[in-house]
Image (cartoon, rainbow, N blue to C red):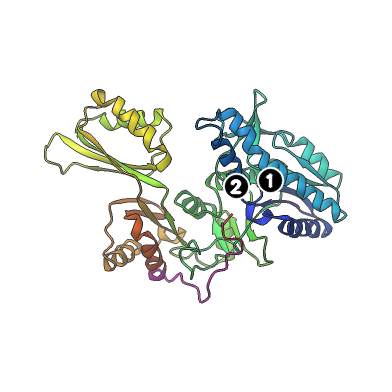
Amino acid sequence: MALIVQKYGGSSVADAEAMKRVAQRIVDTHNAGHRVVVVVSAMGDTTDDLLDAAASLTSKPPKREMDILLSAGERISMALLAMAVNELGVEARAYTGAQAGIQTDSRFGAAQIIGMVPERVARAIKDGQVAIVAGFQGISKDDDVTTLGRGGSDTTAVALAAALHADVCEIYTDVDGVFSADPRIVPGASQLSVMTYEETLELAAHGAKVLHLRAVEFARKFNVPLHVRSSFSNKEGTWIVDENYSKSKAMEAPVVAGIAHDRSQGKITIAGVPNVPGTASKIFATVAAVDGNIDMIVQNTAVATPDSSNLSFTVPQAEIPAVVAALEESRDKLSFREIRVSESVGILSVVGAGMRSHSGVSAVLFKTLGELSVNVDMISTSEIRISVVVAPERLDEASRAVHTAFGLDAGTRAVVYGGTGR
């Protein structure tokens, strides 16, 4: 008898019929002899509707009250799903994040989990009940409701799985598993049977949307096996495990496991930066002071004056105004000439554990981009990843071409059941 944590995204519980289908899957798992804990997201567009309601009243809602408001969507889902499971003859109990013992810091809208005390959940499953927990939320030390930010329900599920020592955490979405690229952009994307935590982290960090970065980090830290599946089919899905297990499932890792693309970032270039030690440190300290999340960095010393350089970096689009304002405020201290902003860039990433032991990945990537006449603006690498910045209007075309160049195309078109990828 296994302890299984299941997480269902918004598209999986979008309406009453979807809710009934999910309830039946939960009951089937329970009746097979397993103990079941469920984490559920808000139904369909509920969160967007709540945001619109707030926007109709104020342009600057208090963050504390926004967290109370946005947590309501998951609470609705948990209660309705518990009713649906009970209707099928299996006792279920619904719990808010606070009732489930999810303790967070006080960063409203982007809270971090700092402790897990899931006593009530543990008692429920010990008594043979299905515990259904509202995702995306917790409670601070001041007893305030907090939300975990984007992908928070994934993080809730994995954190609960770790705290309860679950055998597996199943992430149910509207695609059949993790694919070699976003099937909405690359219709011929291949489903992957097994991936490492490290590969999944790189893909999640660079635009892949099936799993959230923080959830994968939790899974790797506590060695929680993840099983990404569709709630709309019974296909096997994708297992995400440590590298040793992955190698036991496949004789050799593919050179490239997947392609990720990201349009959510912009580029800031600081021109005329004094070319002296310590300047970059001051610039990035200024960015960090406003919680700017820097991804790629390039410094170009080939400028008109030998004592200055240009420094470019990418940040999420939503953070650009605060970062630019902080830099302008510190212009005298930093002594730069000007700031240039590209509101949107395209980031294409090639990821694969096999890159550690195989050469030629860069050659294939840049040859393919060159044949398309796609210009590369910035480059960033890790042991198992190469990322490039390209024009956002060329990103989809480039993603499809690079996917083909690395032999990742499948013979059939990938199925997206719900249309959202969550």
Q: Quadrant of residue 75?
A: top right
**Does 388 sit left or right of 336 as displayed?**
right
Q: Residues within 10 Å of mark 1 (few under 14, many from 20)?
A: many
In this rendered view, identify the residue nearer to me: 251 or 259. Answer: 259
Q: Residue at x 69, y 66 (%)?
A: 234
Can you give x and y, in whole percent of width and height, for residue 106 in the image?
58, 27
> Which quarter of the figure is the C terminus placed in?
bottom right
Asked if marks 1 and 2 touch (Cβ < 8 Å), the reply is yes
- Occupied quadrant, residue 88: bottom right
Q: Is residue 374 above or below residue 74?
A: below
Marks 1 and 2, how far apart at CA: 9 Å
The residue singled out by tag 2 in the image is 219
The secondary structure type at the circle numbered 1 is helix
**Residue 364 to residue 45: above or below:** below
Majority SS type along the magenta span: loop
Residue ranking furthest to the bottom: 411
Residue toward you, 182 or 125:
182
Q: Along the horizontal axis of the image, is 234 left or right of 90?
A: left
Residue 324 appears in the figure = yes
Q: Amino acid at mark 1?
A: Ala
Range drawn in magenta: 404-417
What amino acid is found at the position of numbered circle 2 in the picture?
A: Ala
The residue beneath circle 1 is 161
Where residue 210 appears, as percent x and y from the top left, is 55, 55
